[in-house]
Image (cartoon, grey):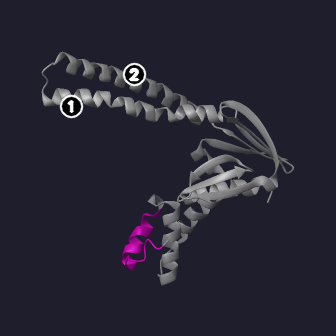
Amino acid sequence: MDMYIKRTNSELIEILYQQSLLTFESQISLREEIKKRDIKVDLSPLETSISSKLTQIKNLEYLKDFGFKAEKNSDGITVTRTNRALFTDFTAIVLGVIVFLIGIYGCINLAFTFINGDELDVFTLAYKFAVSSLVFIGFSFFSGLKRVFDYTGFELTTINGLITLKKRFDVKLEEIKASAADVFVETDDETLFLKLGDQTIFASNADNLVQTLTLKELAKKLKGA
């Protein structure tokens, strides 16, 4: 949080004028550094921006960054996968298949080039290698397939202190019921986990302050606090 400690006062003021472009963590760090130096400048736009983000975090609006949404009711909350996230996952799968097949074609074409002993210039050879490498890029798109398996049918609800988690474990959709006391947040290296007993509900980057606060706020709401 001391990212601005080496900046001059005038530099801090210049950054303040562009505060809307900063990350949430940077905004907080900038505010603290300006206050610590007692620089006489209007902080109201920065304060408004920070307050707005804190309100969004409290309302769980940043769950959409995970691909989920939370709906409140009189008895508790329900968390489900967003349609946009499902569409993104299926799009990634389709693109992955297309790119993977192009890569396979490139690998076969490259293999026949060497088998037949074709003479190629450097540019053509580099092009064929590039097409072949699409196999690996195609694999990276298949991460959407895992998310589809993990979160199709996903639902997390809390009603009067009873929590129900519907999630796929090893493809099969299972339902777990537990008390609010079984919800907790755990950090492992750079990853933050929201857990229900032994099961992981969500995982996020522990270095991302918005995601961290969002998961902690969700845990608090699940506990009914």
Residue at horizontal 68%, vertical 57%? 185
Pick the residue in front: 3 or 40: 3
Check whether the beta carbons of the residues at disc 1 and disc 2 lie within 8 A of each other: no
Please provide percent x and percent y for residue 191. 56, 55
Give the amino acid type for the residue marked by disc 2 in the picture: Leu
Left or right: 191 in relation to 165: left
Residue in view at x 77 percent, y 37 percent: 175
Q: Please name the residue that numbered disc 1 is placed on.
A: 126
As for residue 209 lying within the magenta part, the answer is: no
Q: Can residue 149 be seen in this view?
A: yes
Q: Which amino acid does label 1 sit on?
A: Ala
Compared with 13, 191 (above or below) is above
For the residue carrying disc 1, how many other residues have a C-alpha within 10 Å: few (<14), some (14-19), or many (20+)? few
Q: Where is residue 5 in the image (x, y as percent from the top left)?
A: 42, 77
Write down the residue under mark 2.
101
Q: Which tag, 1 or 2, sits closer to the chain's start?
A: 2
As for residue 17 lying within the magenta part, the answer is: yes
Q: Where is residue 142 in the image (x, y as percent from the top left)?
A: 49, 32
Q: What element carries label 2?
A: helix
Magenta region: which residues? Answer: 2-19
Q: Which residue lies furthest to the right in this view?
A: 160
The quadrant where residue 170 appears: top right
- Residue extending farthest to the bottom is 38
